[in-house]
Structure formats: structure tokens, C-alpha cells
Amino acid sequence: MIDLMICNAQIITVDTQRRVFENGAIAIEGNKILEVGKSGELMQKYTARRVLDATHFIVMPGLINCHMHLPQVIMRGVNDNVEVMDKLKYYIWPIQGSYDEEDAYISTQLGLLEMIKAGTTAFLGTGLHPRYGIGAIAQAVIDSGIRGVISKYVMDQTGYALDKSALHPGLWENGEESLRMACDLIENWHGKGEGRLQVWFSPRSVGGVSEELFRRVSDLAKHYGVGITAHWAEVQNNADYTLERFGLLPAEYAQKVGMVGKNVTLVHGIYFEDRELDILAATQTNICHCPVCNAKLAMGTAKVTQMLHKGVNVCLGNDGMPVNNTADMFREMRTALLLQRNLYRDPLYPTAAEAIEMATINGAKGILAEDVVGSIETGKHADIILVNTRKPHLIPIHDPTSAIVWAANGEDVDTVIIDGKIIMENRHVLTMNEEDILEQAERRKHKILEQAGVKVNHVWKLQ
Amino acid sequence: MIDLMICNAQIITVDTQRRVFENGAIAIEGNKILEVGKSGELMQKYTARRVLDATHFIVMPGLINCHMHLPQVIMRGVNDNVEVMDKLKYYIWPIQGSYDEEDAYISTQLGLLEMIKAGTTAFLGTGLHPRYGIGAIAQAVIDSGIRGVISKYVMDQTGYALDKSALHPGLWENGEESLRMACDLIENWHGKGEGRLQVWFSPRSVGGVSEELFRRVSDLAKHYGVGITAHWAEVQNNADYTLERFGLLPAEYAQKVGMVGKNVTLVHGIYFEDRELDILAATQTNICHCPVCNAKLAMGTAKVTQMLHKGVNVCLGNDGMPVNNTADMFREMRTALLLQRNLYRDPLYPTAAEAIEMATINGAKGILAEDVVGSIETGKHADIILVNTRKPHLIPIHDPTSAIVWAANGEDVDTVIIDGKIIMENRHVLTMNEEDILEQAERRKHKILEQAGVKVNHVWKLQ
């Protein structure tokens, strides 16, 4: 008697052979996948306490969002139509720099709920600050049932790249203090929630962190066996900074200060020259591409096509809700392809299959969990989503990978399984109180603007 | 006593003053909008037979899809990852050229259902052929309750631009015959369904139509008071053709043969040089931009930013489901902005407001219905959608235009009103049998491939 069986499913496994089953089944025991195979065979072989009939569903690995600012979710869509550095300086930083713990907590709850409802089963969160009440955030992640990385900013300089005056005082931190707190967070929380919660370091961008501090973070990450995530080469200003100050291109500087390697996920990575991609590939550094945010804010286009050709591990992220504005990984998959094809005028690459890899197995590498999740195969933890295809925009399906990338939305996800547990069923999240979270988030929107002294711009004037 | 009142709504009117109401109401009498104003005032002034409480909804004009191939919907996602001309030659044309009337009818039903469920209240359909059973298609459009234009191909040459051998024999038509049938269709069906059905001409692309036939279509459209839609300057081959054969750029050739004017909607319009945009603006010719399809197939990027600056009326279309793969106008709005901003590196333009204009009032111009629909204002027909914002990816809302363009999906549309009638409520379409249509469409997918002798490519091999 096993715990759970999913049968009669179209399965996109993303396993090492990249098998796709027309009528497949998945046997799950405890939190792990016991076997994947044809539905008829597995239904004969096992008896399960719970059987999910996945007729009309595409079943695939849960999606992995490798860049998420949980405390920014309740700033969704604030003052769109602003250049990225201005948006940070005049809106995002002042609002976050005025947060109290409850603001950050409610934002976190909304973000977790949104991700689960869109089929995201694991995330790499960045940018926590002591004023957000980090313990409560860690506990919220665990209670939601999601798999996730949280990480605390580390910094010892107040500038942002060449523009030194930028960071809001409410977000300043002292070097020793910020590092000590990051280590405490790891010691207290890393591995909690039956191992689903990881705690990493997130040093601020170049300009906010000294060479020495980057190196100490690198050493400490090895000491603790955790990862590092940092925004890197996301604006021209950033690339100019390393060149002007150190005579190095962004990836060269990253290599110099220990910000490369399998346990490092650099975010955006737009301003890399071709020869820098070789450094990233050789060091197995992960690059998290955020296509919707990059295009919306006209930040430039990451060289995803070339990165994939050179063997760089490219994963995908939603980034923050003031810049995106949703945590829907289906949208990132589709937009990543649209932008690359449009720019390089290639109707064939990247493929839908490559987009699915970026959002699943590449993402698993990006959160140091390649052996744990990212594909549906024996021995991996059961992080699985069921996508309802019985909808007018998804019928007929000639190829399930095409349907997932080119047609589906996060709202088509019906059921979410994380670590073998059913977390969402029939779009009802079992671990959270959806109505209560939505109500609180909507009510809080005016407070966070008022306490920061920020006014909302309207595209058209309100009556 | 009026027929219908929508109250407590955030309303994006797209009226001449571009008003947005925080707590507005719309009074509807018969098929027309009687008044738009503040909720409190209108609720005092009118008593209505039916009141829709739109708390937590954004209410806006129904979206207008200005390029739709209804008979292609059941080819959704067939053999993605093929260059556009190869896709037409080896997949789309052979499959359509082997259709029987039932294939086209079921495809049409699925397309109508999909559009309504995504908040599209009017469409400009193209490319009907006698083998599809046009009368049944016209009737299906009327029965669905949607507002729409259908149009029959007109042609007297079998080539497609420079590649003369391309068109599938199953789709060939004789010049006189194709024109006569198009006129018959107009005489029999134009204005039916209480005026909701229009019938236009759709001449095939350059290469398929002689100069003389283009001119006759232009004259006949004036005679009947109907519009013309044609694919134009959508591939380089097309622009090369007019230059090589006639020494004219695509817009110059369009002007020469009568394919410009207020009643003309040219589709794609990618290969226009800057000076051609002046011709389009001066003649008030409508350009239908199809961003998702253009980027997916790497067709090139229409100069939407420059067109808008020069005053060209740019509307949006989904195009066919083998190339898109969904009829979701929210996606087109968002993708249009992402592509323009990414290409021209401008984080401000086009704005979310401009995207909404393209999908509503500009679309109304594109279907020759500017006085009828495209905005919510007194005297216009009530084509209105209610978007449910009580969802994690739409909360909080700081600005409703931003929420619609940057966050919403077609699946967030809860209620659709067309010509004053509630066509969809709580996502249940009242005029169609959804389950039956989905079942028939899914079952038919193998038949259409087999009868055309087309094999499906799979991105990853099926087990």
C-alpha cells in the first residue's frame, strides 16, 4: 500500500531521458517518487491510499522561481512606467525602508499564496532585512508547505553601483552586524520544515559590498554548505562600476571575489560580454533570467540563447511584484522565448522544451536542489503539479510541452503537490487562508504608501 | 425601470476624456449604455431589473481582436518551432485544404468560446473559404452572441508573394468565382444578428491577388459600405515582391491598389519603412499588430512605437491558434508593450493606457465600429467585461490600468456583456455548450492531421 498514485496523465518528466508519457502514472511513497511509468502497469503493480485521476491533466515537475522578493508583493504595480533605478530610489526602497514587521509578513503570505496557486513549488527568495521580522517570514514559508530559500542581505557600503547616495536609510546595515545576522539566520533556520527551508546569503549588488565582504560571504557559504544569490550585471551602471573601479568585467569581478560556482545564482546577468559567458559556464555559476521584468523596464536582454549554447545553467525568476507584476512562471517561460526569438530572429530557438528545463531542472540547480527536485523520477521528492487542460485555450493538445509553454497560465494549475503532500487541490490552497490574506493585503496598500510619503501615479486620472 | 445596472465598480471607460471611476456605475437600457457615473448617484437615479454588484471587479469595454482565423483553432500548437512560411506551406494550408465543413464548424465554435471566455466581445475574422461551409459559420457567430466580422478570401493568383507554388490546391479559387461568392456572402449575411454580424472582403496577400482584383475589391467595399482586411508586409518576401514587381514599397503599393483607408485593416504590417507610416496615418488605414505570433515565429517587430507617435491607428489581434497559441487579448496587450520596450529600450512607452486603447477603442476603429463599441459611454452599445480582481496575482491594485495590462489574464474575466445581453456569467458561457465543444474539438484533432497526411512533431518523444 503506497500513499499516493497519479494516473491517466500526460506526464512531462524532465528526467534524464526527457521522457513524456501519453498515459502515465506516478507512484508516491511518503515524500518521494517511487516509480514513474505507464498507467496500466503501475495501477496493476501498486495499491494506493489516495489515487488522483489525471485524465485531462498535464502532470509535470513543480515550477521553480529562482528570484523572488517576498516583501515586495504588496507593492504590486506601484507606479509602473518608471525607469528601474528611479523605481528603486523613489518608490521601492522608501516603501520597504518604512515597513513594519506586519507589512512584510502580509506581503510574504500573499507571495507564497500567489506562487502556490500558479504552480510554483520552490523559490529562491532574496533581500530580507531585519526590519521585516525574519523569523516570522521563515515560519510562514514553512507553514505554507512550499519549498524555499530565504536569504538576508549582506552589505557594508551604502551605495548602489556608481550612484552612491541611492539606498534608503531605512535599509542601511552595518557590515559586521549584517553578516552576523545572516549567519544566525542560517544557524537557526537552515534545513527546518523537514528540510524544505534553506537559508542562504544575499549580498547586495556591487557598490553595496566591499571586496573583502564578498570574499567572507563566499567562505562562509562553503562553511555552512549553503548558496549565495546576488543581483549581478543587471544595469549598465553596474558593469561600468566594476570596470572603472577594478578594471574588470562583471563576471571577471565575480570570479575575483568568490561570487561564482555551483552554489551561486546571479540574477539578471544582462551586461555580460560573450567571453564572460565562458567564465560562467566553466565555474557552473547559475544565471537567473527575469524576462518579464527586464523587458517591461527596458533593462536590456540577457544573452540567454548564447548562454544555453555555451552550457551556462540558465534558470528563470519572477523578480519583485512592483516590476513584473505577477509570480507566474508560465509567463516567464513564454516571455523568455518570445524575447530571444524576436531579438535574434530565430523561429526555432530557444525551444519550448528548453523553456521547461529552465523553469524546472535548471531551477533545481539554481537552488542547489538538483538531486532533490526539478524532475519526476524515482528517488526524487514529489514536487509535482497537475495542469487542467480541459479549457478552451488549451484544446486540442498536439504536444504537451507546446501547450505548457505557449498556451497555459498559472491559473490552469489545478493541483499542487510538494514533498508528497497535496498543498492545493481544485485550486483551493489547503495550507493558507486565501480570503483572509487577500483582504489584509488589499487593506494594507494605502498604509505602506502613506508611511513612506509616496504618492501613486495614475495612468489615467481617477474620478 | 431600466434593464441592467452595474454598480460599485472600478471602471476604465476609455471614453473621450479617458475617465476611470473608483466606485462607478453603468446604467444599461436595451442594448445601449444610458449613463456612466458615480455609483451612489446612479443607484439613486435608476431602478434596474437586474443589478450586478461589481465590488472587486474592474469593468472595462470588451476587448476587440482584430485578426482571427476561426477555422484554424483546432490546429492549436500543431508543430510549433517552424518558420512562418514553412508552417503555412507544410502544415496550415494542407490541413485546411483538406477540411470538411464539420472540421471548420467545430473549429469556429471552439474559437468563439475561447474568445468569449477571455473577454473578447468583438473580432475581425479572416480567410473563409467555400470548403468550410460559410453559412454555418455565420450562423454560429450569430448564435454565440458575439459581435464579429467574417470575411471571405478573394484571389485570382495562386502564389504567395515571390514563392508562387506555395498555396495548397485545396485552397485555390478562381478570381470571378471568389469575388462573386464574397459579394453573395455580404448580401446574405451583412448586418444579421441585430447588426452584430458584419461581412467584409479579405483579399489574399500580394502574389495571390492581381492589381485589378485589389481595385475591384476596393470599389465593391465602398459600394457595400463594408471593410477590407488583408495580411500586408508581414514577411520580407512580401515587401520584396512589391518592390521587385512594381517598384513600390508595401504601403505605396497598397495606396496604388486601393488597400488603404478608414475601412481597411492591414494585418501584421512589419516591413514598413518610416516614410510609409505617413501614408498609413494620412489615409487613416488601420494596422493590426499581432505581437505574440510575430515574436514566436521571429517574423520581425512592427514599428508600433513610431506608428503611435505618427497617429496611425494600431489595433491588436491574436492571429491563428497554430501560431499564437491562444486567443487572449490580455496577453497581446502585455506582449506588445514588452516587445516595444525591449527593442527600443524605453521603459516608459508604450504605456499601459496605450495598450488598453489598442485593444478597445482602436480595435473598434479597426472593425469600422468606432461609433458603436470600444468604450463605455452614453449611447454606445453595451459591450462590457467584468474582470475579477479578487485573486492573489491581482491584489493589491494601485492602478486598474496597470492591473489589466501587467497582471490580468483572459481567465480573470468573470462576466461578459455583449449588446446589453449577459453572455457569460461567473465564467459560464450561457450561449454555448462548453463541454460538448471541448469534447468534439479534442476528438477531431487526429482526423484533421490524417486526412491531410501531416505528422505531428514532438518536442520530446512520447512514450
Image (cartoon, coloured by chain):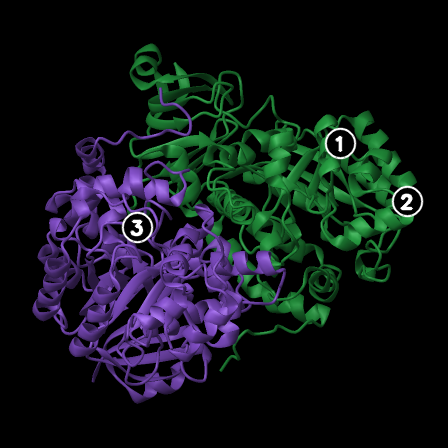
Chain colours: A purple, B green
Q: Which residue is mark 3?
A: A160
Residue B223, picture quadrant = top right
Tell me whether the residue at label 3 lies in contact with that at label 1, contact meaning CB atoms closer than 8 angstroms.
Answer: no
Residue A344, picture quadrant = bottom right
Residue at (36%, 79%) from the top-left corner?
Answer: A25
Q: Quadrant of the N terminus of chain A?
A: bottom left
Residue at (69%, 43%) from the top-left corner?
Answer: B267
Residue A364, picture quadrant = bottom left
Q: Which residue is mark 2?
A: B246
Q: Which residue is mark 1?
A: B279
Q: Measure the alpha-carbon separation of dots 1 and 2.
A: 17 Å
Residue at (25%, 59%) from the top-left corner?
Answer: A209
Give whichever of A297, B110 is nearer the camera: A297
Tell me whether the residue at label 2 lies in contact with that at label 3, contact meaning CB atoms closer than 8 angstroms.
Answer: no
Q: Measure the alpha-carbon separation of dots 2 and 3.
A: 57 Å
Asked which secondary structure carries label 3, the reply is: loop
